[in-house]
Amino acid sequence: MAVLDTFSLENKVALVTGGAGLFGRQIVRALAEARATTYVASRNLEALQELAEEFADQGLTIVPLQYDQGEEQSILALRDQVLGREGGIDVLVNNSVARPMKHGYEDSAESFAESMRVNATGLFLITRAFGDAMAGRGRGSIINIGSIQGMVGPDPLIYAGTNMSGWYPDYFFHKGGMINFTRFIASYYGACGVRCNCISPGGYETTAHPPVFVRQYSEHTLLGHMAGGADLMGAVVFLASDASSYITAVNLPVDGGYTAK
């Protein structure tokens, strides 16, 4: 097979969780453009249906589904729905995330526990549900969408002069745990032909960011700018495809060099 052909996802079935957000949109687009049969699932079905209509106008087909990562029965129902339609799955992208700790470090124990229920327990349950299905077929790629905040501590200097902060302990906790969970899953399913890797994106620039934050964050990177709307696409297709068939248990920072500085 020619090397460029190994990047194609034609005849592969992919599921992206939490696909309507900043990173989710480009992940879903990347898989659809690479010709995967692409499912996208979250609690907000309406947002996903709007995304499907937007992509359809551009000649891309995605299938929106609803699920709640905080409920095991909802996860299992999602698995059965995808497998019932397709007979199997080749790619799972764990992108869903809940952010219940609106008051950061001063928030309640209940808010922290709710975050863990979705972002830790839920991650385990959906990975097991679809990982077992992949293992039964002897192939598959699981991609966890982490964060550089799972690799380094918060830097107060990038928030100076803004009303923003990085003091969200649950996010650092579960994104850090996700990286080693990736290694665990890669080990557990490796003999079954299932790979598991993590992508840890850096900051994504939006119009809501104050210019002072964008400048200070950008100065912390090696490339001198924040991430944009296409910067995850190549990494996702690579790790989902046969082009990375001998790569597993890797955490790949896509951060413009933020964590190297």
Image (cartoon, rainbow, N blue to C red):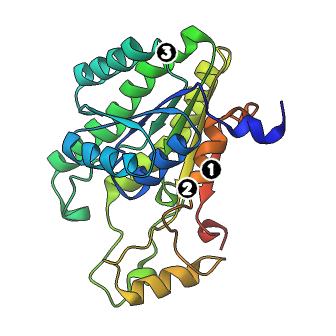
Residue 135 lies left or right of residue 8; in this view the side is left
**Could you tell me if residue 218 is visible in this image?**
yes
Q: Dot 2: what SS?
A: loop
Would you place residue 90 above or below residue 158 in this image?
above
Q: Which type of secondary structure does the marked residue at label 1 adopt?
A: helix
Q: Name the amino acid type tagged 3.
A: Gly
> Which of the numbered marks, if any, corresponds to residue 88?
3
* Residue drawn at x 67%, y 68% as measured from the top left: 260
Q: CA distance from mark 3 to mark 1?
A: 23 Å
| Label 3 – label 2 distance at C-alpha | 25 Å
Q: Is residue 27 left or right of residue 165?
A: right
Is residue 32 found left or right of 221 in the rendered image? left
Marks 1 and 2 in Cβ contact (< 8 Å): yes
Residue 79 appears at what percent x and percent y?
A: 36, 19
Give the image location of residue 198, x and y in percent: 56, 43
> Crowdedness of circle 1 by 10 Å Cα count: few (<14), some, many (20+)?
some
At label 1, which amino acid type do we have? Answer: Ala
Quadrant containing the C terminus is bottom right
Rendering coords of residue 194 (x, y %): 62, 22
